[in-house]
Amino acid sequence: MGRRTPQRYRAVLTGAGGGIGSAIARRLAPQADALLLVGRQPAPLAALRAELGPQVQVVCGDLTAPTTLDAIEQAARAMGGVNLLVNNAGISQFHSFETQAPEAMRAMLDTNLLAPMLLTRRLLPLLHQAPAAQVVNIGSVFGLLGYPGFAAYGASKAGLKGFSQALRRELSDSAIEVRYFAPRATRTSINSSAVNAMNSALGTAEDSPEAVADAFADFLAGTAWQATMGRKESFFVMLNRLLPSLPDDAIRKQLAVIRQYLPK
Ligand SMILES: NC(=O)c1ccc[n+]([C@@H]2O[C@H](COP(=O)([O-])OP(=O)(O)OC[C@H]3O[C@@H](n4cnc5c(N)ncnc54)[C@H](OP(=O)(O)O)[C@@H]3O)[C@@H](O)[C@H]2O)c1
């Protein structure tokens, strides 16, 4: 992967109080002249601000509310513009699709897909003002490889990939790049106890948020438009594209175990 010229960032990071978000905030802070952290809960954002220094500002609010987008846009203007937007906030529900509540599906699509799209649209005028800018959407291996129990979540993350690729191409005559970074299973509170138990029963590899933030920092410094964490996961994603019947078979063999943990 080629490397970019090192850059100072004026960044907006959503979901900054969460597991992966706070690890990314810590990695970005030394490279940032301004860092705007967004989340719903004030306490973790205030703690990060105290830890990371005066270049850090906070917007507290729900990303599915237009008033939060107003507040982010206003704060981004006040900090002198943006050359990096990281759409990291997300929610997940591991559930049998047949009985999953429609509200839960809607919430995943609103938070994981529509909110990043609307925030990106809001910040595009500011991103265009920067000599070079990036939008990085945090996807998931489950957006690239459909997996039982994650139909709605996977749809939201696959949608995010489609959005990223199309917008990347739409903006390819501008100085804004749109990119997609897909973690694999990571030890954070997004995963329910059922997911954690299933992962240990299946021997699924899990990363720490710090390992994800390290890989994210490498990705940011590199030039690939998309990255997937984990060798095995990257291989399966490639197989899924080229020979989908092979992952079909492998995942069907796991189904009895998955069903033991799948909330009905
Ligand atoms: N952990 C994994 O296994 C894994 C694997 C692949 C991809 N990912 C992706 O990585 C990203 C980060 O997840 P994580 O594992 O760090 O989960 P996490 O610890 O639960 O953090 C998610 C963050 O998103 C924020 N958020 C959720 N809904 C929001 C909303 N409506 N408005 C504003 N903020 C909202 C939460 O903020 P508050 O806490 O303030 O509400 C939380 O800080 C997500 O996009 C997730 O899908 C995670």
Image: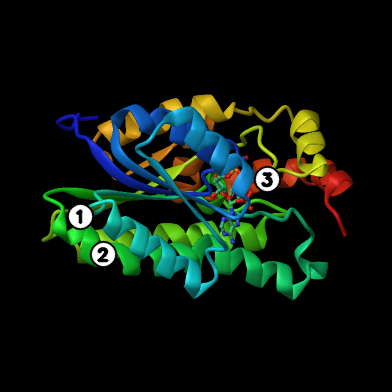
Residue at (63, 43) in percent of width and height: 43
Is 129 or 113 nearer to us in this picture? 129
Is residue 194 shown left or right of residue 146? Answer: right
Disc 2 target residue: 124
Mark 2: amino acid: Leu
Disc 1 target residue: 176
Q: Look at the picture and state if 112 lies above or below 54.
A: below
Asked if disc 3 is less than 8 Å from ligand 1, the answer is: yes
Q: Which label lies toward us, 1 or 2? A: 2
Mark 3: amino acid: Ile
Is residue 66 shown left or right of residue 202? Answer: left
| SS state under label 3 | loop
Q: Quadrant of residue 33?
A: top left
Q: Earlier in the sequence, mark 3 or mark 2?
A: 2
Residue at (74, 53) in percent of width and height: 94
Tell me the distance, in whole angstroms, between the alpha carbons under discs 3 and 2. Answer: 29 Å
The label shown at residue 50 is none
Q: Is residue 230 in view from this perspective?
A: no
Is 236 or 18 nearer to us in this picture? 18
Instruction: Determine whether label 1 and label 3 are within 8 Å by CB.
Output: no
Q: Residues within 10 Å of mark 3 (few under 14, many from 20)?
A: some
Q: Look at the picture and state if 248 lies above or below 204.
A: below
